[in-house]
Amino acid sequence: MNKQTILAIETSCDETAIAIIEKRKDKSVKILSNVVLSQAEKHAPYGGVFPSLAKREHAKNLTPVLERALKEANLLIPGSTPIKDKLKNILSREPELQSNLEEFFKAYSNPQIDHIVVTQGPGLEPALWVGINFAKALGISWSVSVGPVNHLEGHICSVLMPESEGSVFTPSVIEFPALALLVSGKHTELVLIKPGHTYEIIGRTQDDATGEAFDKVARMLGLPYPGGPHVEKLASLGRPNQKIKLPRPMITSKDYNFSFSGLKTAVLYLIKNMGGIEKITEQDKADIALEFQQAVFDVLLHKSLRAIDEYSVKTLIVSGGVSASSSLKNALNESLNKLDKEINILTPKRTLATDNALMIALAGIHRIKKEKQATNLDEIQANGRWNLKGIN
Ligand code: KG4
Ligand code: ZN
């Protein structure tokens, strides 16, 4: 086959996303479409993602997102797709999704898709299930194989698209051993990657994830959800300030684990001791944001550099929502410049740092290559805590 078309579905958190890529024989990849519909505004009043709302929104949005993704890919063909009996069983818990999809099948015929991949975990299980059932429904109706992808492997693969490239690119080459610093709203992990994409988790957060800590501190500073980009913007106005000092938790611990919950509490007390958020000047708020951000980056970078040294790492991957931060990338480049060793750094394009389905499609390429036969649909089950260790 000269080319394979892969459709990827991502619904692990609050983004409903579908991407379609074409993988060509010369290993280049063409992005046919990459649609992301964020629910962030809907969750903002709760200060975080509300699982049952996320599930409902995915069910409502998946069919329109599919239609858009196929249309952008020039794969939306008027006609009809026979509705199979099995569809009712698969979507029995999603009546809205079922009726949307049946309407869709009445209007369009089978598109030319060779594989479907879907995020199986980790993430919010009710949200994952909607995407998985949708993938199964499409697979059965279009007679196409469906394969599971790990969301974190997706974040790692988000760096395979070079930052400066357009819609056709040759995936970046990763020199092994590689180290991935995964920093998202739900995860903070240091993962050692060996040839053939086998993973060893060498450290992780013991409590809050990096993005979660940013979101919580943003809330304390009166900033909207998701807070990371707002904290970064405020921090850019901050000045190093003698009276505003925060701890660097676990920076000297011998392991590669992290802890951000104490840091978040330290911000809470700092604000209290300064008389409460209403009494704090805008400049002081910016100084707090800067010191908090610096404390987080100091710990992340200190541990990453130590792991680079211990494991003779050749490529450092920094990915996940927090890697959208230019301040993190600047701090990273500054620390690596001080090392007297050449190391290849891979970070995702800004739009691929937060959740999207293109990264799931890129991870899907590896999975499809490795799987000798199509996965049995019944084996694809949402797994909220699926970690990278078991994948190879
Ligand atoms: O990867 P992602 O979209 O979702 C998860 O899989 O968790 O990450 C979202 C997280 C949020 O917590 C958000 O505040 C954080 O990434 N984030 C940032 C920045 N942009 C997004 N954190 C710090 N600085 C940023 N510029
Ligand atoms: Zn994510």
Image (cartoon, rainbow, N blue to C red):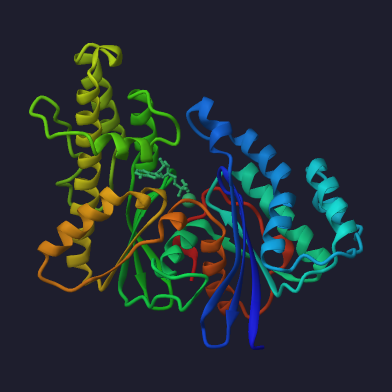
The answer to whether one can see residue 144 in this image is: yes
Q: On the rendering, which quadrant does ligand 1 occupy?
A: top left
Residue in front for this viewpoint, 80 or 117? 80
Residue 85 image offset from top left, x and y in percent: 92, 57
Task: Judge from the rendering whether residue 197 lies leftward or rightward of residue 356; answer left or right.
Answer: left
Looking at the image, residue 197 lies above or below residue 337? below
Looking at the image, residue 268 lies above or below residue 48? above
Task: Judge from the rendering whether residue 290 lies leftward or rightward of residue 76; answer left or right.
Answer: left
Looking at the image, residue 62 lies above or below residue 138? above
Residue sitting at the far left = 242
Where residue 179 sits, quadrant-wise, is bottom left
Where residue 24 sits, quadrant-wise, is bottom right
Residue 190 image offset from top left, x and y in percent: 32, 57
Residue 224 image offset from top left, x and y in percent: 43, 29
- Quadrant of the snapshot with the N terminus: bottom right
Residue in front for this viewpoint, 234 or 135? 234
Residue in front for this viewpoint, 300 or 237? 237
Count numbered badges in the picture: 0
The answer to whether one can see residue 208 in this image is: no
Residue 69 image offset from top left, x and y in percent: 67, 60
Residue at (38% x, 26% y) in the render: 219
Residue at (53% x, 88% y) in the render: 26
Residue at (85% x, 62% y) in the render: 108
Residue at (55% x, 34% y) in the render: 41
